[in-house]
Image: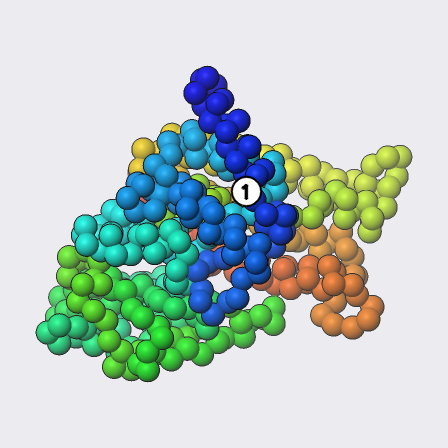
Amino acid sequence: MTTSLQQFRETTRVWLEENCPSGARGPGFIPWGSSKIELKEDTRRWLQVMAEKGWTVPTWPTEYGGAALSKAEYLVVQEEMQKLGARPPLTGRGVNYIGPTILEFGTEEQKAMWLPRLARGEGGWCMGYSEPAAGSDLANLQMRDIDEGDHYRLNGMKIWTSDGMYGDLIFCLVRTDPDKPKHEGISLVLVDMDQPGVRVRPIQLISGDSPFCETFFEDAIAAKHDLIGPVNQGWAVGKRLLQYERSVHGGVNTSGAQVQAKEKSLPDIARHYIGIDKGRIADADFRERLLHLEMDTRAYKLTQRRVIAETQASAPALATSILKVKGAEFTKLRAELHQFALGSQGSGWRGDGFNEDELNATKAFLTTRAVSIYGGTSEIQKNIIAKRVLGLLD
């Protein structure tokens, strides 16, 4: 490590220690900008000081709310935050998806208007891509966007809108020319969700939660200056945004802080529920499965670090699909081993016979069944790897 980078590390460590409130350390809620979610005082203060420092989006240019950190400095900030137990001050689709897309494809006026707001966490963003007949075949989308002079009028429906009930704004892929081939005539537009023409309906999942929604657009209005990229050329813009999304799911985004999930130790859980035999977890098959998972997880995290250090763009390209596939596998396997370790206590839904952690484990298991579907299914990612990495024929 160079002397200048070591000095940056020491300065960063001191600054974080002095400025990170105690209530923003350890597990807890990470803001994503929604005006509909009230923040606790320490969480709000942490977001404010980090935004002023430019560290909500550390690698963005300073004129847009960032700190213009190098990749090496970015990694130092993440490492020192993790050592301190500091939560990321801001996450979500604003700084991680649409922000980098505007930075790459937006006009100077759009960058000046939106990026500083995103960096400050002003507004919670949703993603309007999938439709009932346009999921994996996204280019089949039918939501209409009609040019009415100084604005667009939107009619149609989006589905699987994450956090739709809390959203303030949504970026949508829409059809601006129905007469063109389906991969053409598509545009990306930003829409205010707090208007009479936008209606949201939550979808209840098998886990009992409702993080996804149906979103209906009934004569909703979008400003002409909020169309990102050229009109009718939104397919290329939308695909690039998906790379940013998959970078987040693969843990290699370089816009905002990496969100490191605070997981309970599986070995500790297994020792408690399965028991100890001669100083080891008393189930040889479980020990072997857990060992492989821990080795794979460490290798995966090292690969994440290498990809961040090596990529020349704001988001890796092909590596996102590889990391998305493997990350989904490891997440599902960890939930399976957690439930296995709990035994019958890992199948509770409600009742006095289960504690809160056991009930949460059941919901987590059910929730993780979807990680290989959302953000681009594993099957689609494997097709991308086959074509663009291995060079196989269709």
Where residue 331 appears, x then y in whole percent? 58, 50
From the image, tell me which residue sits under label 1.
19
At label 1, the amino acid type is Asn
Horizontal side of 115 relative to 355 (left or right) equals left
- Whether residue 340 is visible, yes or no, is yes
Q: Quadrant of residue 84?
A: top right
Residue 50 image point, x, y percent: 46, 46
x 53%, y 71%: residue: 210
Whether residue 309 sits left or right of residue 87 in the image: it is: left
- Residue closest to the eye, 88 or 93: 88
Which residue extends farthest right?
278
Horizontal and vertical percent for residue 234?
21, 58
Residue placed most toward the observer, 206 or 65: 65
Residue sitting at x 34%, y 66%: 170
Determine the residue positioned at 40% across, 43% down: 54
Q: Tell me which corner region of the image, top left, top right, bottom left or bottom right, holds residue 209.
A: bottom right
